[in-house]
Image (cartoon, rainbow, N blue to C red):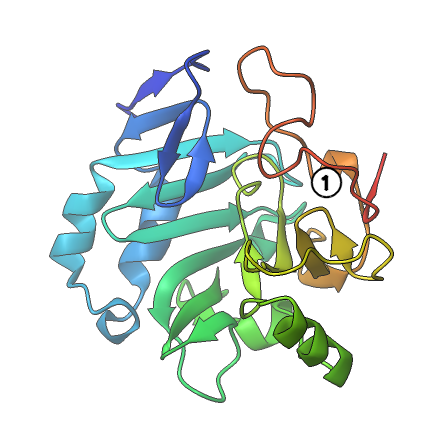
Amino acid sequence: MGAICKPHDAGGGTSFLGLHFDDYCFGPAPEHVAHAVLALPVRAFDLERDTRREDLRKAFYLAAPGFGRRPDFTLGAGAFMVRSFEGADPRDTVYLIWPVRCDEGEAGLDCHNGMGRKAFRFAADGALRDVSADVLPTDPVLSSDDRVRQTKYGGSVLFLLDDKLPYAPTMRWIMEFDPDSPPLEKDDPKAAGPWAHFGFVHWTGSRFELVDRITRSQWPCRKLNDAPACSTYPDGFEDPFVIP
């Protein structure tokens, strides 16, 4: 593809647009990922296709095994991110792209102030379709107990943690807390180290599901320097929601 690929660097890896790439390629984006980005209507991005095309020539990306014959790709180019999710049937492949327009009432993931993440898939006629309503779960909604917890401990709005996407098809909803507030009790049913846990968004091969627990292979630890396994961010604590 003409890209230059960098192996894992014991110096600590590279962070790009908030995602940790411990090894990555830089150069022209994989063809099918670029095709999806260029097929989006202009209103989705506020980026003309010529701008997208230029950004895609200078993309950072990482490949990981998925459900299909092709690897899954996590890619950053310009101001946008793409994560491809392959299925056993190539027709099931989904491209999660962000930030894109996500108007109030539309299906999407983590939509705020008119922008969020949406899922797209190529239809039989070759057109790129928004399939967010078909493949994405709805975002978690805070209960009255959650709002009490949020107020008492200085909790944030729910945050979609996506640091694992370069390595596994999983994201996680969490609530972060004000470090100056009292710590969350360890026996709190949502306690997960420094956060409150609101579920994993996991790709099944054809759609995403919101699940409470997941295996370690689906939420892998980063291998960083000579640090002990699962000792660095965003791990570093005993996680009751990750099954060993």
Q: Tag count in the figure?
A: 1
Residue 35 lies, in percent from the top left, at 33, 51
Q: Which residue lies under the disc numbered 1?
A: 218
Quick check: 136 left or right of 18? right
Quick check: 147 left or right of 214? left
Residue at (26% x, 67% y) in the render: 45
Nearer to me, 13 or 122: 13
Nearer to me, 113 or 71: 113
Q: Secondary structure at mark 1?
A: helix
Nearer to me, 118 or 128: 118
Residue 44 lies, in percent from the top left, at 30, 72
Quick check: 30 left or right of 237? left
Amino acid type of the residue that numbered disc 1 sits on in the rendered structure: Gln
The image shows residue 44, relative to residue 224, as above or below, that is below
Residue 63 lies, in percent from the top left, at 49, 31
Asked whether the viewer can see residue 139, the reply is no
Query: Label 1 neighbourhood size at 10 Å, few (<14), some (14-19), many (20+)?
Result: some
The image shows residue 70, relative to residue 141, as above or below, that is above
Asked whether the viewer can see residue 29, the reply is yes
- Quarter of the image with the C terminus is top right
Quick check: 184 left or right of 15? right
Residue at (26% x, 23% y) in the render: 2
The image shows residue 121, relative to residue 28, as above or below, that is below
- Quarter of the image with the N terminus is top left
Residue 91 lies, in percent from the top left, at 57, 55
Residue at (20% x, 69% y) in the render: 46
